[in-house]
Image (tube, grey):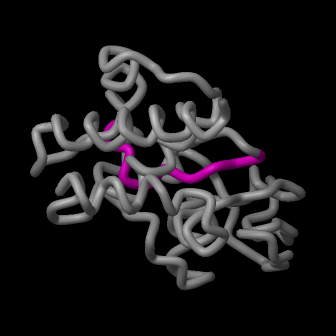
Amino acid sequence: MSERFHDIAVTVNGEEVRERIDARLSLVDFLRATLALTGTHIGCEHGLCGACTVRLDGEVVRGCLTLAVQCDGARVDTIEGVSDSGEIADLQTAFQKRNALQCGFCTPGMLLTAQELLSRGGVPSREAIRDHISGNYCRCTGYQAIVDAIEAVAQQRAGARR
């Protein structure tokens, strides 16, 4: 029989964290309950809505489908970390200006997903933007404003690189 509790060391938003946790604890519950990082939301708990989106070693993952013990030795970036670092300041401004954040529940996951797409460079088509954010469910905006915001930032970043 395997142990129920495990010691993990994980870097969260640039800070090393060491905790003894239940092997069944999801990453999103670890972030919210253990570390009080509540910007990552809990939605469907089945990996479908995208509210629990975080970055694990640079890749966007669903925090509800990832066990915290799987993150031992890894780097996790939450919305708090990428926001505090200024990495997504332009996206946040565009979401605000274009009213792409209405209730705000999906916004953290949507911003991380958008940043993942935009970090590839170039200006993706509106169809490519829609496809990339399709795993993030928004009940309020109808997506038009979100796509507008992401497209505007892509164009702005591409113009800045010239």
Report the residue at 26% width, 42% height from top: 146
Percent position of residue 80, x then y: 55, 72
34 or 135: which is nearer to us? 135
Residue located at (36% from left, 19% from top) = 131
Left or right placement of residue 22 versus residue 142 in this view? right
Is residue 71 inside the magenta stretch? no
The residue at the point 31 percent across, 20 percent down is 126
Q: Residue at x 85, y 75 (%)?
A: 16
Q: Which stretch is magenta?
A: 48-57
Q: In this view, does 36 lie above or below 151?
A: below
Residue 25 in view (yes/no): no
Task: Give the percent coordinates (x, y) of residue 132.
Answer: 42, 25
Considering the whole magenta stretch, tell me its main secondary structure: loop
* Residue 35 appears left or right of 5: left
Q: Nearer the viewer, residue 159 or 107?
A: 159
Q: Is residue 88 visible?
A: yes
Q: Locate the C terminus and report the quarter of the image it occupies.
A: top right
